[in-house]
Amino acid sequence: MGSRRRITVALVGLVLLVVAGWVIRGLGHSDQGNAGPVALSTLPAEAAATWHLIERGGPFPYPANDGVVFGNRERHLPARAADYYREYTVPTPGSRDRGARRLITGAAHELFYTADHYATFVPVDPAR
């Protein structure tokens, strides 16, 4: 086998691996909203405090950022209208900024938590 052919085969193999990884990653995120909800009580205490602020309508520690539309650009949550989701900061002790933790609410009273700035989400049952 000539060197050009080996390079071509290697490149095709690499492309196939990248595409397969992308598809597998996409499948992993597509069912996150279908997983059973976790109890709010199992999340960091700051998440419960943020939830209680949401229920009361504030005041929020980051008024310019809390309660704003969450665009779901990563598409990890179920697809909805552009203004369907709202995001709220879950403070991270010791962080100098807002940190990575958020609660996301849906217009139909859904609740999601992310600890890694929108990379992954878990549905939350606030009654537990």
Image (tube, rainbow, N blue to C red):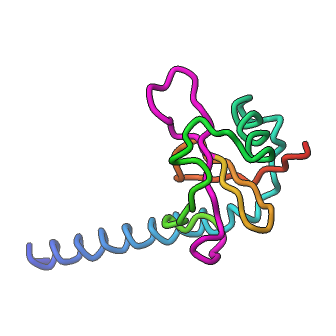
Q: Residue at x 44, y 26 (%)?
A: 96
The quadrant of the rendering that contains the N terminus is bottom left
Q: Residue furthest left?
A: 3
Q: For the stretch drawn in magenta, what is the main secondary structure?
A: loop
Count numbered badges in the picture.
Answer: 0
Q: Is residue 4 above or below residue 123?
A: below
Q: Nearer the viewer, residue 76 or 83?
A: 83
Q: Residue at x 57, y 29 (%)?
A: 92
Residue 85 in magenta? yes
Q: Is residue 100 above or below residue 108?
A: above
Q: Is residue 67 above or below residue 90?
A: below
**Residue 83 at x, y = what percent?**
60, 71
In magenta, the rendered stretch is: 78-102
Q: Is residue 93 above or below residue 105?
A: above
Q: Residue furthest top?
A: 94
The quadrant of the rendering that contains the C terminus is top right
Q: Residue at x 64, y 64 (%)?
A: 85
**Residue 118 at x, y = what percent?**
54, 52
124 to the left or right of 28: right
Which of the 4 image quarters holds residue 33?
Answer: bottom right
Q: Nearer the viewer, residue 57 or 11?
A: 57
66 to the left or right of 110: left
Q: Residue at x 68, y 61 (%)?
A: 32
50 to the left or right of 61: right
